[in-house]
Image: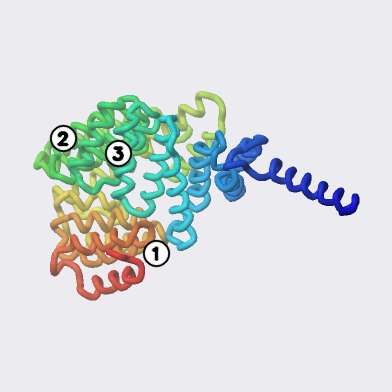
Amino acid sequence: MSTRTKLNLKNILYGVLALSLGSMTVAGQDLFGRSKKLFDKGLELKRKGNYAGAAENFGKIIKKYPKSDVIQTTYYEYGAVLFKEYEWQYWKTAGLQKYFEALESFRQVNTSDDSLLAKSLYMQARCFRKIHYRPAMAFYDSVTVLFPSHHLADDALFLSAYIDPNLPNSLAKYHQLRSQYPDSEHDLGALYHLLQIYRTTGDYIKSNTLCTEFIELYPDSYYTQSIFLYYVSNLLMSGEQSEAVKYVQKKAKEKQQLWEQIPKEYVDLSDNELRRKAWNLRYEKDSTSQDNRKIIQSYLDTKITLNKAITILDFAIPKRSQPVLDNVDSLFFTTGVFQEYHVSYALERARENLRNRNYVQAANISMDLVNNPLVRDPSEAYWILGQIYPRFYLPSYSLQVLRIAKPGLILQEDRMACLERLTDNTHD
């Protein structure tokens, strides 16, 4: 063998060795800290919102360096960025495949780091929540049971209660949240859902006890005005009409007191002009302007709420002319007085919201009609729910909606139309 040939072979061997040491692994180990660099780059891309790029970097670590020191955290981060990238594409085949890939990555997390394990279980719950509530609920519960002191434990407990279709179980979880995590940011939500559940199950006394507590604890909450209406309708449903009237009169005095605090230069303005004025005052920095803004906004909110409360009284205690339908809200259909044109109006609002893709509001109105025993034929409400649920949930949710319909309450053609929409996608 010539000297030149030997030299060429030597150079080739050196090149192969350099490649082996520089870019490959020995039994999956990272010899030169490449995985840490890829990991840091992935985190940087994640912070910038480039989830696809971050997933590519984390994926390289999993493929090339399965015994790296950062592999456990990488499994979690890879699943997390896949979840973010495909969060709103889960109904597509490609998106669903990525969801399962994220789930598989979360399942690989097997470490003594309790915080990382808790986060992994929590993210598996979030993934399953887009697919089906039962496994999601199980993973949320596992976070609370296994890691009760983790910062995600109260969040997991709240979400488990929220998606639990069993009202007694949901009730117990909300109570557990309020007692076990009194400082949780979800206390407001838990209290709100508790009083709603008690309303749904007909325990109006407990519901109103919680309504009073809610108003005391969260007087400035977005939901406080609605809680006032719940309180009034609860009194009416429990037969305490005189108390309901007194409570509304109290609200009327509150409205008058707020009106007296509005600056004189604004008293001749219409409600719409006042609303615009309050909006403009948001940009003023002085405290007087901000105080005026709050007074105007409180007055307008109180006035709207008072009008709705009077409407409820009109329905429950007919002694004035029928209210204008524009004041009707789905809430009013729990007050006990039902006329056909009220149902028609509710259905029209539900259809309009469905057309405008405001699915949550359409579902809420439809469910109000479905759950009200005074509605003789809720078939169209069921049909609307059948249109909504396949867009956001596994088809079995829509089948559940159809199955709970009592015979005769839903038109056969509507039932078949809903089932046909689901046939291609359901495996129940």
Q: Which residue is rendered at x = 20% and y = 72% of the image? A: 411
Lower sequence index among marks 2 and 1:
2
Q: Nearer the viewer, mark 3 or mark 2?
A: 3
Count of numbered tags: 3
Is 93 situated above or below 40?
A: below
* Coordinates of residue 324 in the picture (x, y in percent): 28, 55
In this image, 263 relative to 324: left or right?
right
* Quadrant of res 180: top left
Query: Residue 421: x, y in percent?
Result: 33, 70
Q: Residue at x 24, y 71 (%)?
A: 415
Which residue bears the numbered disc 2?
A: 206
Q: Amino acid at mark 2?
A: Lys
Q: Nearer the viewer, residue 384 or 64?
A: 64
Q: Which residue is mark 3?
A: 141
Is there any visible trace of residue 271 in the rendered image?
no
Q: Name the quadrant of the N terminus.
A: bottom right
Q: Is residue 254 above or below residue 417?
A: above
Tag 1's secondary structure?
A: helix
Within-10-Å neighbours for mark 3: few <14, some 14–19, many 20+:
many
